[in-house]
Image (tube, helix red, strand yellow):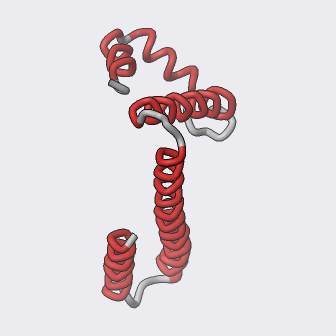
Amino acid sequence: VIIVAVGVVIIERANNSKHQQSSGSSEEEDSKMHGGSQNVMIGLVLIVVQSILSVLQDLGEEIFMQAADFPATMMLGLEGLYGFCIGTIIYSTVGDQLRIEDIDSTMSILSKNAKLRWWVVGLPF
C-alpha cells in the first residue's frame, strides 16, 4: 500500500508541475485541464480502492487456507476458473452494450487467422 501511495504522489506531483509550466493557456485548454484533473482523481481513487480490495482478498485467502484443509494449488486453480467464468459471462452478455468489445468483429478476425486463435488458446498457459 505504501508503494502505491508513493507512486500516486509522484504521478500527481508530475501532473501538477506539468500544468504549472503551461500557465497562461487559453480558456479551452483550461477546460481540458479541469476535466483531466477530474479523470486523474477518478484514476487515483480506483488505484487506492483496488489496492485495498487486493489486500482484503489476500487476507481472506490466508484465513481460508489456515481454517480449511485445502491444497493451495487447487484453490488457485478454482479462483482462476471462477474468474474466467465470470469474465466470459460479462464479456458475452454486456460486452457489446457497454462498448467494451465488438464481439462480432473479434470472432470474424479469429475465424480468419489461425495463428491468433492459437495465441488466444495458449494465452492462459
Whole-percent x, y for residue 65 in the image: 48, 44
Write down the quadrant of residue 6 in the picture. bottom left
Whole-percent x, y for residue 43 in the image: 50, 65
Residue 14, compared with residue 107, is above or below; it is below
Looking at the image, which residue is at 53% across and 78% down? 34
Q: Left or right of 16: which side holds 95?
A: right
Whole-percent x, y for residue 117 in the image: 38, 14
Q: Nearer the viewer, residue 54 or 19?
A: 54
Numbered-mark total: 0
Residue 79, compared with residue 13, is above or below; it is above
Write down the quadrant of residue 76 in the picture. top left
Residue 107, compared with residue 32, is above or below; it is above
Q: Quadrant of the N terminus?
A: bottom left
Looking at the image, which residue is at 37% across and 69% down? 4
Residue 24, compared with residue 112, is above or below; it is below
Q: Left or right of 116: which side holds 110?
A: right
Q: Left or right of 93: which side holds 44?
A: left
Looking at the image, which residue is at 43% across and 15% down? 110
Looking at the image, which residue is at 48% across and 35% down? 70
Q: Quadrant of the C terminus?
A: top left
Whole-percent x, y for residue 118 in the image: 34, 14
Q: Nearer the viewer, residue 125 or 76?
A: 76
